[in-house]
Image (cartoon, helix red, strand yellow):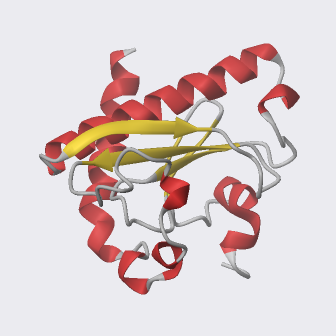
Amino acid sequence: MTGDWRLDRIGSALRGENPTVLRHLDAGFAVIGDVQFLPGYSVLLADDPKVERLSDLPRSRRMAFLSDMDLLGEAVERASRRLDAAFRRVNLEILGNTDHFLHAHVWPRFEWEPPDLVGRPVWLYPRSRWSDEQYALGPQHDPLRKEIGNELDRLRSAN
């Protein structure tokens, strides 16, 4: 691997160098998030680094990306429900305010979250959650990665 894959998440996924990739789907890469303060947080990256927004895609690719987002959301939901009895739901978001490439966030939500945050957008969590080493993606998340990947495989084979 040359350089930091985080500087080119899609290019590194296309080259097989992005260690967060769970699966290459029809229109994007399902990846597990760099931070896991909500275990199972995942992202769908469009598989074309030049695409900045959903409307940049032709309608058929747009529908494929949204279908992949739905698939990843369901896989995270199934894995989260199996691994944590306090699982509540999954939030899906396409924001695009910071990174200039099309991506969708998949956030599992749990009953054990702080009461002042559990029903609010995840972006209201303290900034420290995003940089605290205890929440960084690591080998301890391998079972979670495997569960989400297996669910993606099951869901894809069922269609």
Q: Residue furthest front?
A: 116
Position of 100 compared to 23: left or right?
A: right
Total marks in image: 0
From the top left corner, tell me how far across and down residue 15 is, in percent.
Answer: 69, 59
**Residue found 47% across the figure and 51% down from its top:** 42
From the top left corner, tell me how far across and down residue 25 is, in percent.
Answer: 55, 35
Position of 106 compared to 12: left or right?
A: left
Q: Residue furthest left?
A: 85
What quarter of the picture does the N terminus occupy? bottom right
What quarter of the picture does the C terminus occupy? top left
**Residue found 36% across the figure and 56% down from its top:** 116
Position of 44 compared to 114: left or right?
A: right
Up-down relation of residue 149 to residue 66 (above or below): below
Position of 143 compared to 3: left or right?
A: left
**Residue found 69% across the figure and 61% down from its top:** 9
**Residue found 36% across the figure and 59% down from its top:** 38
**Residue closer to the observer: 11 or 83:** 83
From the top left corner, tell me how far across and down residue 154 is, in percent.
Answer: 30, 29
